[in-house]
């Protein structure tokens, strides 16, 4: 479905025009899929990693860790929201520490990242054993703090 839709968007884009696709899937996996598109030779593809806003991150957290509850039910659970917001704040602090020029701050950031990575791996193992495994495998982690933007530039046709 995504391949057909992307192919069609590129097909109807005028020469020199752009098509933008936003996804959680990293270029290492996504680019091989793009290469199989019928229109692949007609486009130049670039990509960029983007940091998600706090609100987008909150929604992704809720989608990835909902225990069968709807988003509406989760929004009404004040304790759940507070924990999710706390987790996002920790993630932002981790990023700030990792970018610091102070070696001590950088080390603390690395320790926070290692702990978060371990927790993420545990969540993935749990998700892989549940019905959500296809979603985790196909779309990447919904708990990522970033997404990827792919830009397809429709090449100009050369005249002979």
Image: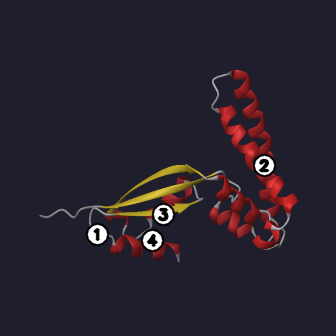
SS class, disc 4: helix
* The label number, if any, that marks residue 14 in the structure image: 1
Sequence order check: which comes first, mark 4 or mark 1?
4
Q: Residue at left 61%, top 53%? A: 52
In the image, residue 50 lies at what x, y percent?
Answer: 55, 50
CA–CA distance in space, label 3 to label 2: 28 Å
**Location of mark 3 (residue):** 21
* The label number, if any, that marks residue 87 in the structure image: 2
In the image, residue 75 lies at what x, y percent?
Answer: 79, 66
Callout in the foreground (1, 2): 2
Q: Quadrant of residue 19?
A: bottom left
Q: Residue at left 70%, top 69%? A: 134
Please identify the residue farthest to the left as the structure is shown.
160
SS class, disc 3: strand
Q: Residue at left 28%, top 69%? A: 14
**Location of mark 4 (residue):** 6
CA–CA distance in space, label 1 to label 2: 43 Å
């Amino acid at each position: 479905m995504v391949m057909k839709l992307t192919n069609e968007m590129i097909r109807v884009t005028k020469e020199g025009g752009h098509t933008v696709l936003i996804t959680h899937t990293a270029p290492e996996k996504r680019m091989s899929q793009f290469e199989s598109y019928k229109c692949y030779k007609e486009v130049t593809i670039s990509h960029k990693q983007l940091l998600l806003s706090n609100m987008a991150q909150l929604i992704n957290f809720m989608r990835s860790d909902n225990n069968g509850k709807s988003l509406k039910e989760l929004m009404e659970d004040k304790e759940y929201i507070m924990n999710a917001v706390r987790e996002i704040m920790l993630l932002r602090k981790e990023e700030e520490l990792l970018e610091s020029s102070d070696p001590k701050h950088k080390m603390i950031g690395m320790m926070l990242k290692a702990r978060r990575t371990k927790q993420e791996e545990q969540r993935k193992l749990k998700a892989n054993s549940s019905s959500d495994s296809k979603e985790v495998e196909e779309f990447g982690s919904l708990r990522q703090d970033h997404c990827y933007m792919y830009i397809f530039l429709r090449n100009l046709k050369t005249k002979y």
